[in-house]
Image (tube, grey):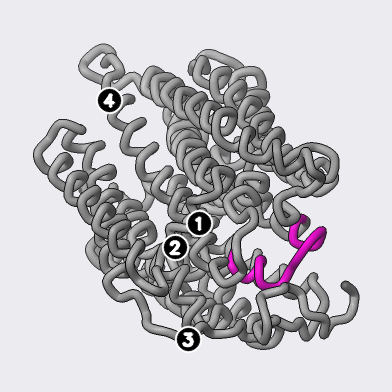
Amino acid sequence: MTATTAAVADLGPGTEVRRRTGPGPILAIILGSYFMILLDNSVIFTGLPSIRAGLDLTPTGLSWVQDAYTLVFGGLLLLGARAGDIVGRRRLFTVGLAIFGTSSLLVGLAPSGSWMIAGRAVQGVGAAIVAPSSLALVTAYFEGAERRRAIAWYGATAGIGSSLGLLVGGSLTDLISWRAAFLVNVPIAVAMIVGARAVLEETPRRRGRFDATGALLATLGMGSLVFGIIESAEYGWGSTRVLGTLLAGMALITALIVNEARVEQPIMPLRLFRSRERSGAYAARLLYLGAMVGFFYFTTQLLQDAFGFTPLQAGMGFLPMSLVNFLVAMAIPRLGARIPNAVLILGGTTVTLAGMLWLSRAGAADAYVVAIALPMALVGAGQGLAFAPLTNAGLAGVDPADAGAASGLVNTAHQLGMALGLGALVSLSAHAATGPGGAVDVTRQVQLALAGGSVLLVASLVVATAVILPAVRPVRAVGNAGGGY
């Protein structure tokens, strides 16, 4: 499709979305906004020591700088995703950008720890709107080969944004201040809002009643699960506080499932889980992201605390991963035309596992190139291979009317995986032996955590092999790639 006014998605009678420009500007707005969210989610890691010193935060207060964002982000994802189907995706997209940009300004100017934590929570609201809306806009504006290329770029952005955020955060923290890492979001958000209003057309709005009960149950249920997982790092999995919160979350999710089976326009349509490919993709993504958040969180500490890197040097230390990730991700459209999507997921997860196992053996006395850079390159290659195919599988064959809900589930699996993985791996790393004088052995902590991340990758590999691969084999056997995915 070359005409700028061509309909780009078959959304059913009377629901076509038309482009006023070519695909380039549209994709730039979508990916630029998504990159901003990812950037903010990772710059925090290299800036935490400076934030702690600048705002005089306790260890618990410092953990809530990240946890407040994750809790709200994970809790509101399904609500943010489904709301776009009802009120219009461009409209909600720009509202989310405005919330995120404003809250970034408040965080960057925060005079106290409590102010910053509150600002981070509001950032989570904006992110819960922008992240699923950006993916839903991809499904609305692109189809066929264009959509495969767009999702490949989306997957590359997901991988590169996480690692590049460490470099940007370290650079701004070293050269200016940790505050600059948040204030940089403000002009980006303004530019994306102006661009969205100039480039994007509004998507059709769905008529009907809003599933208020489902929205409440989803938000409270997801929020309770994320909160319980976060608290496990400090209180342990067996504490009454953690178990009570997790049980409450499970009860609320059960009530959500019962509600969604009854209502006419559910916030989380259960029909999305009828596809083994989609269901497997959600589970595999959750496990994969649980491993990856541990990789970023603990490798950053290894570089700074064991190898003696500055925040800027630590950010630059991730360049081998970022560069390889980008190159591999850009090859995905060509590879996807010849290799089944499920095989790419299996290959990418296997390569990531190899890199994670290698990295888990790194020690402070080792050379950076052999112990860190080479295994990082493997992790980057694996992530580049796996991310876009996992996104494809999570949206495979979905009805366009459910694109927002499906993208919400993809992002929910992403965020829950990060919360679950970080909580579990921090708890595991706490079992590392202490050195002379009770000093924590950082290297041993990192090794334990990355070994745990390797176990999560093995579990993701099992899901992909047992669930996703068998689901797509019969489809490809008759020459249908599952709706172009």
Are the residues tagged 4 and 2 within 8 Å (C-beta)? no
- Nearer mark to the viewer, of 1 and 4: 1
Is residue 129 positioned above or below 294 on the image? below
Task: Establish if 198 lies above or below 136.
Answer: below
Q: Quadrant of residue 68?
A: bottom left
Q: CA distance from mark 4 to mark 3?
A: 51 Å
Q: Quadrant of the N terminus?
A: bottom right
Which numbered marker is on residue 272?
Answer: 1
Which range of residues does the magenta coloring cover?
135-148
> Tag 3's secondary structure?
loop
Residue 49 x/y as whole percent:
37, 45
Note whether residue 350 is visible: yes
Earlier residue among tags 2 and 3: 3
* Residue 113 appears left or right of 343: left
- At 56% across and 63% down in the image, what residue appears? 36
Residue drawn at the location 74% of the way across and 83% of the way down: 18
Left or right, residue 127 beside residue 466: left
Amino acid residing under circle 2: Pro
Query: Mark 4, residues whose alpha carbon is within 10 Å: few (<14), some, or many (≥20)?
Result: some
State the residue position of label 3: 207
Amino acid carrying mark 1 in the image: Leu
Q: Residue at image x 76%, y 41%?
A: 476
Q: Amino acid at mark 3?
A: Arg
Q: Is residue 396 left or right of residue 217?
A: right
Name the residue beneath numbered marker 4: 430
Residue 321: x percent and y percent? Answer: 66, 36
